[in-house]
Structure formats: C-alpha cells, structure tokens
Amino acid sequence: MKRFLLSILALIIPLLTFAQETTDKGLDQKIDEAFKPISDFFSNVIFFEVYNGAPFVIILLVLSALFFTVYFGFPNIRYFGKAINVVRGKYDDVEEHSLGDPDAAVDGDIPDTIRDESKEGEVSHFQALATAVSGTVGNGNIAGVALAIALGGPGATFWMIVCGLLGMSTKFVECTLGVQYRDVGEDGTIYGGPMYYLSKGLKEKGFGVLGKITAVLFAIFCIGGSFGGGNAAQSNQATIVLKELMGLESTGAGTVIGIILAILVGIIIIGGIKRIASVTEKVVPFMAVLYIIACLYIILSNFSFIDDAIGLIISEAFNPKAFGVGSIIGVLLIGFKRAAFSNEAGAGSASIAHSAVKTKYSASEGLVALLEPFIDTVVICTMTALVIIIFNSGGAFTYGGDGSGAVLIDGVSYEGAGITAQAFGKFIPYSNIFLTIAVVLFAVSTMISWSYYGLQSWKFLFGRGKKADLVYKLLFLSFVVIGAAASMGSIWAFSDAMIFAMVFPNMVGLFFLFPVVKKQLGRYFDAIRASKN
C-alpha cells in the first residue's frame, strides 16, 4: 500500500504540470458545458416556488422541524446532556436489560430479537456519530457559509442557526427510525435508512404500496445526493483551494485534480462502513477541532468586533441590506437552504450511517443523532460566519455581490471556499496551506461517508452483489472528476437539488411513523431507570 501511495504522489507533479500547459483544450469548460443543462433541469424541478418566492421544499423542512420540536417537547434542549452521555458510554449497561413494550420491538419481532440485532450491529455510538458527522460536516461549513453570507449578508447566519436548532429534532426522529426498521444480512451486515423504514414502516401502517414507491424514490434521490452534495460539491471546493494554492489556472487542472482525488477516495471506500468508521472516528474529530481552534483564534484575536458581528447577524436577519436579497423572506431562505444542505436534517441520509450502530434501543441512537446539526451548524457554521463577518468589517467586499455568490476582493473574484480562505489569510500567516488541508480533509471525509449512503441505496434498488457494488463505485468516482472540473454554480445547483429531493419521500415516512419514535423513546428511558435500580 505504501508503494502504491508513493506511486500516486510521484504522478501528481507531472500530471499537474501537464494540466498547466494544456490551456487550449478547455477540458474543464467542456465538462461544465455538458453538465450545466442537467444541473439546471433538476434545480428547476425540485425548487418549485409556492409563496413569495419560497420553494415548497424549504417550507416543508422548516414546518416539519418545528412540529417535531414541539411534539417531542423540545428534545434539542431537554435531551442534549443525555445525548452526550450516550456517546460517552454512560448507558452502555442498559443494553443488558430487555425491557419495554414488546410491540415496540424492531420490525415486530419478539423483544429478544432486538438484543440479537445489537450483537449484529457493526459500529459503536461514537463511530456512528463520527461517520454521520463526516457526511454533514464538510465544505458546506466552509464554502456553503461563505456562499450564504455573500448572497444574504450577515443575517443569513441567524437563520442558519435557527434551522440548525430545529433540525436537531428532525434528525432525532429519522435516525431513531433508521435503527428501528433496519435489516440485518446473513453475514451480519446492517442495511438501514429511509428506504427501509418507508417500505417496512408504512407496510405496518397498512400503506404497503405507498411505502414501496416512496422507498424507491428515496433510494434514487439518495444516489443522486451521493453524486452531488456528498461528492461533486466537495471535490469542487477542494479543487478551488488546491488550484489557488498551486497557482494553477489552466483549463485542464480541475480534471487532473479530480482524477487524483478519485484515486484516493477509491482506495478508502472499498472497505465498507467498518473502514469508513475507523477512518472517520480519527479524521473527523481532528479535522473539526483543528478548524475550530483556527476560527477561535481569529474570533478571540478580534474580540472587540464580536459584539458588532453578532449585532449585524441579528439586525440584518430582520432588516437585510445585502444587495439583491430584498426582504426577510429572501435572507431567511438563503440561511435555511445553506443550513439544511450542510446538516441534512430532513433529508434522511444520516440515518443510513446511524442504523449500523450496536444497540437494541433505537431511540438511543436517535438521541446521539440530534447532536449532529448542533455540531455542524450551530457551532462550526457559526464560527465560519463570524470569521468572514469580522474579516469584512473593513469593507473587503460587498454583501450580495452580483447575486451569483461571487464577490470582488481587491479586484479579484472569489466564491465559496475562496472567500473563507481570504478571511483566514488576513489573520493567520500561511493559512492558505492550513485551509487547503482542512477543505481537502472535509471533502474526502464527506465523500467516503456519502459513498456509503449511496451504496446502501444502490443495494436496495439493484441487490447486494459485488458486481452491482462495483458499478456504483465507478459511477461515484466519476462524479469526483466531474465536480472538480465543472463550475461552482452548476455543481452546487445540482447538489442542492439532489439533497433536497430526498426530503419529499423521507417526510412521508416521518409523518406516518413519528408515534413509533415516541414509543421507542419511552422504552429506552424505562430501561435507563431500571438500570439504576
């Protein structure tokens, strides 16, 4: 393996040199031109507007999250400490008990079947959280936040935080259901996610046909999401910062970088969820902590500007001045859209990773999952936003720009991660190297997690054979290259459409099955109380 990796590294420099010299072929532009019509089509279909320019899917997400928050008695606040304790392993001894309503057993089996399934689980609570967080904590936190602020101004940050807090409740519901209705293969491999709780859960409720249809739709959209937001958008931003760091301006550099990323990602995804979990449980905490430390350094170094930044975030949430936003609704939609893309609450994707946990109490993993939007949006996205707002306190760029998401800084156009890089560069020497590493790590960790999500959906549609798996992985890796070569506008429009398309079938399952979640939560709390006696 070491020799193989060294061989790849030895190829990088000549490949990039070749790309730099290949200015006449326009390879990246050709890929972008071919991909843009596809991107535009899906974006127009998914984001159809119903009220004052508001896409129906955004309204559905927000109102659903609000409903679950109220129905479950604000679990995002009440159960936050308990969720941390589950991750810490404080309640591991609860797994020795077999208590609760037999009707609440997974998939209608006898109560002890749940214990058997816990033995066949594949990863710990912490590993499941790390894998799922690696799928949500990505370049949506770096590039997505920059895009939100560039378009909507500081006020977009406020609505991102609100969306993150509400999304904690939605994530709790969908990840509880992911464990509750999972399948266990003959070899002990776990298969879970919305396609299973849609097909099995709705059948329990007497809506078998609807369950099958929505499960298939979700699987199709999830595969698209794995190609888009979980893949192409990540390689796109990694390529932007790598090209900037290396000074590459040729039209073929993106394709070459994409090929290199595809090779590296391909090495990792062969191992399946266990290898993904073993990688992400080490990379994700390191990556997140390093990034948070850098953000904290910038924020605390500019302590006197913090109150001004927070004041702007709150005031412009309700009185936006960013050019092109127009109204509260406009900035709210920008904030919610970027937050939902980043934390994926409501899309159902994270429940695929959480379903592989070793437990017999599905609600235990639902509690763990509610930490994701908090980590992703409330903490990391907010820190990124503060860094950019502090950077722009001297008027480095104009909020709103030309409405495309790109802004002019010192006469040069920047977008996405490029804006964040400029903000870091003002306060931390050589931060372009650090941020490039961070962006690439965020991208790779997100891609390997989403490859698992997409593969599970692919298996649901086409079976669990090795040949079918190989076809998916090759398609997935091809989108790494497409994302690196195409423009940010095309890639992010497609990625948004694919992620948000998953919301429609997923919400059908959540609204039919949320009473099951309440029953499972009560069953888990009964077991915790019994373990203390």
Image (spheres, rainbow, N blue to C red):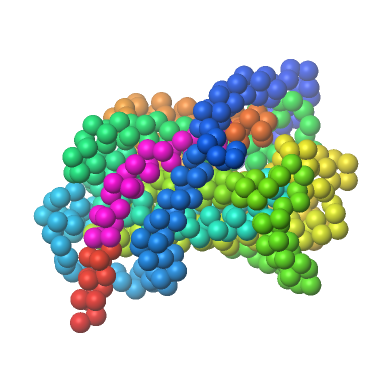
Residue name at image x 60 percent, y 55 percent: 159
Residue 456 position in % (x across, y down): 36, 38
Q: Nearer the viewer, residue 297 or 313?
A: 313
Q: Is residue 503 magenta?
A: yes
Q: Residue furthest bottom?
A: 533
Residue 349 position in % (x across, y down): 42, 44
Q: Is residue 150 left or right of residue 44?
A: right
Residue 255 position in % (x across, y down): 65, 28
Residue name at image x 22 percent, y 71 percent: 526
Residue range highlighted in magenta? 494-520
Q: Is residue 390 magenta?
A: no
* Prevailing secondary structure of the magenta residues: helix
Q: How many marks?
A: 0
Visible in this render: residue 399? yes
Placement of the C terminus among the 4 image quadrants: bottom left
* Residue 461 location, quadrant: top left
* Residue 34 location, quadrant: top right
Residue name at image x 46 percent, y 36 percent: 501
Residue name at image x 33 percent, y 34 percent: 214
Visible in this render: residue 10? no
Q: Residue furthest right?
A: 411
* Residue 496 location, quadrant: top right
Q: Does residue 348 sit above or below 263 in this rendering?
A: below
Residue 476 position in % (x across, y down): 48, 31
Q: Nearer the viewer, residue 196 or 125?
A: 196
Q: Residue furthest left?
A: 110
